Amino acid sequence: HDRARRNAGGGIAAGRGHVVPTPLTRAEEKRIFDRIARDAVEQEPSKFKVGKAVRVTQGIFIGNEGTVVIADLDRNRFTVRMDVFKRETPTEFAPEQLELIEEEEEEEVGPEVDDEVEQEVMAELREAWEDQNQVNPFKPKDGQP
């Protein structure tokens, strides 16, 4: 047959395996460019900065932790250096595959004690040790307070 027929790939089959592509319609162009513009507007500033510790939340490296070494904001990709099979390996991720590891603040062990109260307790303990005639671990050594 000499008639052109539509191909499943969107082109026109011109015969003998040759496919002539069909141009996009104005509606298809508008839909594509509107989506690109919408995605560009929705893109928020990245919370993943170079040097930040991150954890992988999706994909084959789920649960692994590493450090961001490259932040490619144009492509919205982040290169993370992590330990894979005992080797530091740079691997590229999308932001939805990562989460920041919160840096835990060091908490004080126990409540804060007033210096005067501490000195009084230490004096009482020294007296108790001396009363029992035992070696006093709290006794200052050679000029130490």
Image (spheres, helix red, strand yellow):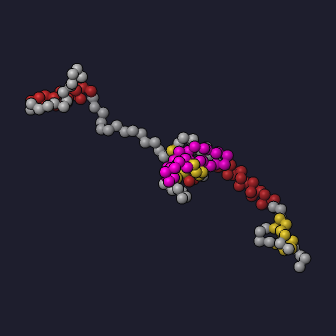
Q: Residue at x 60, y 51 (%)?
A: 92
* Residue at position x 56%, y 44% in the image: 68
Q: Which residue lies furthest to the top in this view?
A: 143
Q: Give the range drawn in magenta.
A: 64-89
Quadrant of the frame with the C terminus: top left
Q: Is 127 placed above or below 102 here?
A: above
Query: Closer to the camera, 83 or 131?
Result: 83
> Is 6 on the left-hand or right-hand side of 141?
right
Q: Which x, y percent locates residue 114?
A: 27, 29
| Picture quadrant of residue 15 | bottom right
Q: Where is residue 42 in the image (x, y as percent from the top left)?
A: 64, 49
Residue 116, position as x, y percentages in the image: 24, 25
Q: In this view, does 11 lie to the left or right of 100?
A: right
Q: Position of residue 49 (x, y in %)?
A: 57, 42
Whether residue 62 appears in magenta in the rendering, the answer is no
Q: Relative to 25, does residue 108 appear above or below in the rendering?
A: above
Name above or below for residue 28 compared with residue 42: below
Say which quadrant the N terminus sits in: bottom right
Q: Can the viewer see residue 55 in this picture? A: no
Observer-nearest of 137 and 10: 137
Q: Residue at x 57, y 41 (%)?
A: 50
What is the quadrant of residue 127 in the picture? top left
Asked if one can make out residue 113 in the rendered structure from this viewpoint, the answer is yes
Q: Assign the magenta stretch its main secondary structure.
A: strand
- Pick whichever, 122 or 111, lies toward us: 122
- Residue 16, by quadrant, is bottom right
